[in-house]
Amino acid sequence: MRLDKLLTHMGMGTRKEIKKQIKAKQVLVNGELALDPGLHVYPSRDTIEVQGEVIEYREYIYLMLNKPQGFLSATEDASERVVIDLLDPKYHSFDPFPVGRLDKDTEGLLLLTNNGKLAHQLLAPKKHVPKTYYALIEGVVTEADVDAFARGVTLEDGYRTMPGQLKILRSGPESEIELTIYEGKYHQVKRMFEAVSKRVTFLKRLTMGPLVLDPQLKPGEWRELTEEEIGQLY
Ligand code: URA
């Protein structure tokens, strides 16, 4: 891989900026001054330093975002804010994208990565990756709803959902629930409650497969996954 390509991928600057740094003798490869931006380097073997700092090369990044309301689960949009806008620009060079979608008004766990294969595995309908949501519901959620969700409900377009596990945390004119589902149809949680004549007024995703939203992350905040969390995804 070209030295300048590796350094842009690692978010060290644009090709032009990196060329300048190389010219200014700020880049070392295996302890020796690198003067050619096109120098061929082996990321796993060569030690690359910029201004005395060793650059640890990696191909993939994995970020856990607590998605706030008001952002689209997309990489770009002509008029709306997107989740990628929330990240430190140093991650932009990795081209991360959201694994699946949360609605604009939904909060919570969203994985961002540039590992397409992993994203594919997590989203494959056949894998039935469980997702747990916390929600506020307008209407009294009852044991009859728990039973209906456990059997699967029929959405307005005739689709019958797989069984979901509904847990009532508080039942009243406004109810509080947790729901685990094993598929990801468009607006699924909202439509499941519509099927039992209730309305979701707040929705937040708590888990996706083995990943659990870090309670330390406020809406809009993100962090890299730990090695352990990455390992659990495979
Ligand atoms: N179900 C919904 O209705 N919306 C989401 O954002 C996620 C699941």
Image (spheres, rainbow, N blue to C red):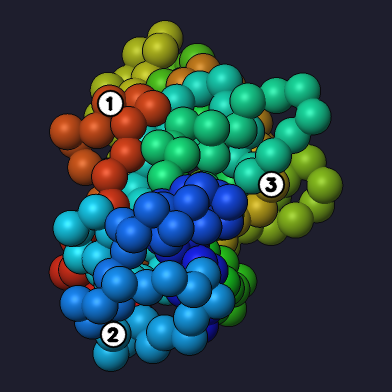
Q: Nearer the viewer, residue 178 or 32?
A: 32
The mark found on residue 46 in the picture is 2
Q: Nearer the viewer, residue 178 or 73?
A: 73
Instruction: Please state which amino acid type lies under the numbered disc 1.
Output: Lys
Label 3 CB-ligand 1 distance < 8 A: yes
Residue 77, placed above or below residue 200: below
Residue 17, placed above or below residue 226: above
Q: CA distance from mark 1 to mark 3?
A: 25 Å
Numbered disc 2: secondary structure: loop
The picture places residue 231, in percent across and down from the top left corner, at: 24, 76
**Residue corresponding to mark 1:** 218
Local crowd at mark 2 within 10 Å, few (<14), some, or many (≥20)? few
Numbered disc 1: secondary structure: loop
The picture places residue 83, in percent across and down from the top left corner, at: 53, 36
Q: Nearer the viewer, mark 1 or mark 3?
A: 1
Q: Residue 130: in sight, yes or no? A: no
Numbered disc 3: secondary structure: loop
Q: Which of marks 1 and 2 precedes in the sequence?
A: 2
Instruction: Please state which amino acid type lies under the numbered disc 3.
Output: Tyr
Please say if the residues under marks 2 and 1 sit with CB atoms less than 8 Å apart. no
Local crowd at mark 3 within 10 Å, few (<14), some, or many (≥20)? few
Instruction: Please state which amino acid type lies under the numbered disc 2.
Output: Asp
Q: Nearer the viewer, mark 2 or mark 1?
A: 2
Q: Nearer the viewer, residue 185 or 13?
A: 13
Residue 146, placed above or below residue 225: above
The picture places residue 35, in percent across and down from the top left corner, at: 43, 71
Q: Quadrant of residue 170?
A: top left
